[in-house]
Amino acid sequence: MNRVILLSLAYFIILIYPSFGQSGILDMKNQLSLQSTLNFGDDLTGQLGGRYIPTLSIKGNLKKNRSVDAEISVNSYANFYYADEKFNEHDWKLKPYRIWLRYFSPRFEIRAGLQKISFGSASILRPLMWFDKIDYRDPLQLTDGVYGLLGRYYFQNNANIWLWALYGNKDTKGWEIAPTRKNRAEYGGRLQIPFLTGEIAVSYHCRHADYSAFYVMQPGITEPFFTDQLLGFDAKLDIGPGIWFEYTWKINDDENILFVKNEHYLNIGMDYTFGLGNGLNIITEYFRFNSNTSNNYSTIALNYPLGIMNRIITAVYYNWDTKDLYRFISVQRDYDYLTLNLMAFWNPENVSIYGSPEGRNLMAGKGLQVMAILDF
């Protein structure tokens, strides 16, 4: 079903482009990345891979200050995995990354298709990570999109309202542990308004989830499909340092007996750029997740430019409940079209946060990662 929708949307974009005439703008961008990761455990393991993401952007101006634009991109990758002193496993895939069409004016927009939906104030561990899986440590900031319809309206005082409806998303998103029930739509919205020196917002999302994988040992429950509701609050103020608060309250169905009724995700954070040398930016956050179990994290991240072309980024996450410590340091060098990234990491063997877009966690344990990113 998704393939039919995407192909129909792609063909529609191609067909309407000539109608823009000379006002149409066509732009093609490409991103090619090569990556190698080594894990220094009891046995040396590793990964060697490449990724190519071409992106076609189209924009056309209509009458009465209205415009239409679209984006089509594909995520293609191949990985080879090293273990037992040889490359003994591989995977590859070609899949849609973004295919969307948008109609917009200065104060209104509506976007349909496979798209990225992301909001909130937190930077590292985000309670409002509802529809993406962006890893702060990832130089590419990759995340799969969601199939849906998103509308936004911007008021004159800079307040804005979002409404969305999602359909056909079979994989888990954000903090989800169960996929959405097949052939069921999801819906929600967000209201964001100016507040003092920043903004505050409230968000809501509702879906019908498939918890079959958790109820295989519960023969008395033959239809483990339950409603999940998410209610989010966030605020950010600039008072010299930037400070923020982000919270998600997840309400589980009463009949979903394997999980507590209420789950809570909380982030309180601050960032500030000190006038030291080229400018040292520091982000610190406290994150708490409370469900059947609780986890409390403290995080600190430092970002320092070493001149115009180089920068160093380092971060430490600490789980107060499991006593796990996550550490990484990255050195990045930028050219006009090329970015080189060298990362060293030292994490627990069994990690409880993040994961790669391909479902593997390549940054468990101790290791190194080298990545070259070419944008052209």
Image: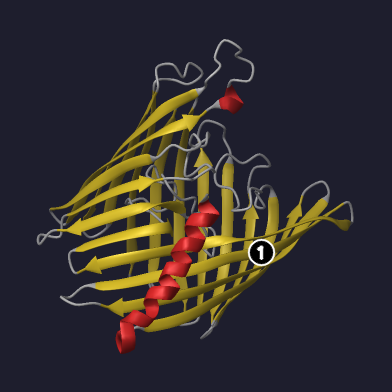
Looking at the rendered structure, the number of numbered marks drawn on it comes to 1
Query: Going 51% across and 52% down the picture, which residue do you hit?
Result: 2
Residue 115 in view, yes or no: no
Q: Residues within 10 Å of mark 1 (few under 14, many from 20)?
A: some
Spot occupied by residue 29 in the image (x, y as percentages of width and height): 50, 79
Query: What's the residue type where badge 1 is placed?
Result: Tyr
Query: Going 27% across and 44% down the picture, which residue do you hit?
Result: 189
Which residue of the protein is positioned furthest toward the right in this rendering?
85
Query: Going 18% across and 69% down the picture, which residue do you hit?
Result: 106
Spot occupied by residue 309 in the image (x, y as percentages of width and height): 50, 81
Residue in front for this viewpoint, 37 or 113 = 113
Residue in front for this viewpoint, 196 or 252 = 252
Identify the residue position indicated by label 1 in the image. Answer: 77
Which residue of the protein is positioned furthest toward the left in this rendering?
156
For the C terminus, which image quadrant? Answer: bottom right
Spot occupied by residue 143 in the image (x, y as percentages of width and height): 51, 56
Spot occupied by residue 231 in the image (x, y as percentages of width and height): 30, 35
